[in-house]
Amino acid sequence: MIRPLYDWTMRLAGHRRANWALAAISFIESSFFPIPPDVMLMPMVLANRRQAWRIATICTIASVLGGFAGYAIGFFLFETVGQAIIDLYGAAEKFESFQAGYNEHGAWAVFIFALTFFPYKVITITSGVTALSLSAFFAASVIGRGLRFFVVAGLLWKYGEPIQGFIEQRLNLLFVVFVVLLVGGFAALKLL
């Protein structure tokens, strides 16, 4: 079941409009979409390693711009849209206590969670709700998201063939690990 999905993703990664698809996924993931852009970034770099830095740049820029959309949801639409998204991730009860001390260390939170599988959209919305400084939000997002995507792209650029072989040989195991990390990010959100 996983192999046909992997093959389809690899074909999509080589499509002439793959960059636009990556940008769209990166943008919407930062404000409301649950699937991280890594699912497109990784096969795109594996399909065309010479374009690794360009792909990481597209992913970073679109993700940061999408982060501003999440910030806007929190700042302008929290009562109508933002609260529903926070409720969707089961974080409503603990959101108020999290919000109280957020601005004190908010830039660090944005940076740290931009690097992880923690749902980044929650941090972008929270930053808007608490009116975190836009310059701090921007800097933390660019550095955090950039590090995440450029490290992944760099590793795939440097070790692409062995990593691709490793992925293809252990596709089912890696899929399980990916799902565990994704669910773990949502579980961590509930614990905050």
Image (cartoon, rainbow, N blue to C red):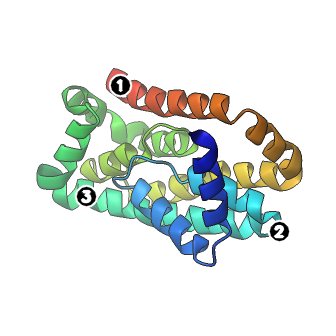
Query: Does any portion of residue 65 appear in the rendered image?
Result: yes
* Placement of the N terminus among the 4 image quadrants: top right
Q: Earlier in the sequence, mark 1 or mark 2?
A: 2
10 Å neighbourhood of mark 2: few (<14), some, or many (≥20)?
few
Name the secondary structure under disc 1.
Answer: loop
Name the secondary structure under disc 3.
Answer: helix
Q: Is residue 33 left or right of residue 25?
A: left
Name the secondary structure under disc 2.
Answer: helix
Q: Which residue appears at 19% of the width and 61% of the height?
A: 76
Q: Quadrant of residue 170?
A: top right
Query: Does any portion of residue 41 appear in the rendered image?
Result: no
Residue found at the very far bottom of the displayed protein: 16
Rendered image: mark on residue 73:
3
Q: Which residue is mark 1?
A: 192
- Comparing 115 with 168, the one in front is 168
- Amino acid identity at mark 1: Leu
Q: Earlier in the sequence, mark 3 or mark 2?
A: 2
| Marks 3, 2: nearer the viewer | 2
For the residues marked 3 and 2, what is the alpha-carbon distance in whole angstroms? 36 Å
Q: Which residue is mark 2?
A: 50
Q: Position of residue 59 (x, y in %)?
A: 58, 63
For the residues marked 1 and 2, what is the alpha-carbon distance in whole angstroms? 40 Å
The total number of labels drawn is 3
For the residues marked 1 and 3, what is the alpha-carbon distance in whole angstroms? 21 Å
Q: Position of residue 41 (x, y in %)?
A: 63, 57
